[in-house]
Amino acid sequence: MGAILPLLIAFLVGNLAAQTGVPREQCLGGKLLSVGQESITLQFNDRITIMPIAPGAEIWRHGADLASIQQLVPGDQIYLQCAKPESGGSVMATIVAVPEGDDMVTLKPHQITAIGVCVGKLIAVTAESLTVRNGEGTCKIQTNAQTTFWRGENFPDATALKLGDEVGIRYIVGYPGRVLTAESVEANVAKCEGTIVDERPGLIVVREFRPKDRCTVYFDTRTCIVDPDNDNERDFSKLKKKTIVLATGLDLGHNSMRAARIYVEK
């Protein structure tokens, strides 16, 4: 049974380089190698690209709008939004954005937002902030009325969280001052995917594909059963031996979890 980070995978990856009518492979960002008069040279893995900059393109770096691409710094991690002139011609960058460190960005014209995640052990919690420790140090992130909280189910505030919880926080970076504000907080998220090898009232035992362990999945009236025919129902009779399932929910430790959703594969 392994922890998962849906907040990172679903949100961040889907918002890195949106573009209008331009295939993604033609609008790849990457490490800035050099800056020309009207273009920038980028490296993405082993691929080197010279990207023309559209007239009036928005240039954003570390929370500030820049007057020129000449203010970019070699080594910057560049994110792009691109367009192609209707009359043809080369793909050109209409937005060039550089977040700080491991942050990423949402690329909405004139509303560029730096976003990121902090994953680790919860070591402090107040009504206004959370502090998390991981292998890179600590991060303190403020919360507000719009922050959502999940610990097995949705909660209106941080009171359900416990010190020592493994949490994943998706945050927005505010400027000036680099103020981190949590959009969502998820605690002790776990998944278990494999074949049901035992079934009892209120639980199933699943032999996982990777790693080859067994996990105990508890379910109750709050658990949704999702299959290709009927989502969000509670027909627990579908949880039979030899059925392949993917369960997501609250990690209870000792290879056990309380499922929020169980996806049934045909």
Image (cartoon, rainbow, N blue to C red):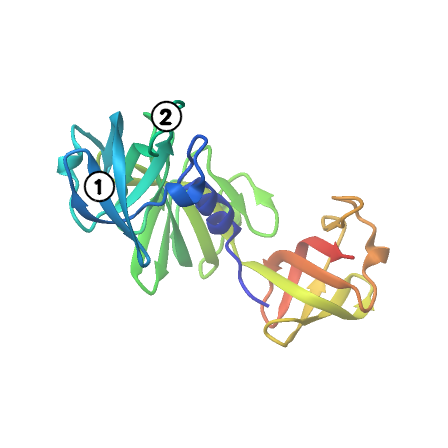
The answer to whether one can see residue 249 in this image is yes
User: At label 2, which amino acid type do we have?
Assistant: Pro
Q: In the rendered image, which quarter contains the C terminus?
A: bottom right
Left or right, 252 with reference to 141? right
Residue located at (41% from left, 56% from top) = 119
Secondary structure beneath label 1: strand
Residue located at (83% from left, 64% from top) = 240
- Considering depth in this image, is 75 or 260 the residue closer to the camera? 75
User: At label 1, which amino acid type do we have?
Assistant: Ile
Residue located at (40% from left, 23% from top) = 86
Residue located at (16% from left, 28% from top) = 67
Q: Residue 197: where, in percent of width, then height?
A: 78, 72
Q: Classify 10 Å Cα crowding around label 2: few (below 14), some (14-19), many (20 and above).
A: few
Secondary structure beneath label 2: loop
The answer to whether one can see residue 175 in this image is no
Tag 1 residue: 40
Q: Earlier in the sequence, mark 2 or mark 1?
A: 1
Q: Residue 164: where, in percent of width, then height?
A: 45, 61
Observer-side mark, 2 or 1, equals 2
Give the total number of marks visible in the rendering: 2
Q: Classify 10 Å Cα crowding around label 1: few (below 14), some (14-19), many (20 and above).
A: many
Residue 143 image label: none
Q: In the rendered image, which quarter contains the N terminus?
A: bottom right
Left or right, 225 with reference to 162? right
Left or right, 215 with reference to 156? right
Tag 2 residue: 85
Quadrant hosting residue 238: bottom right
- Considering depth in this image, is 55 or 86 the residue closer to the camera? 86
Q: Residue 129: where, in percent of width, then height?
A: 37, 44
Q: Residue 116: where, in percent of width, then height?
A: 37, 46
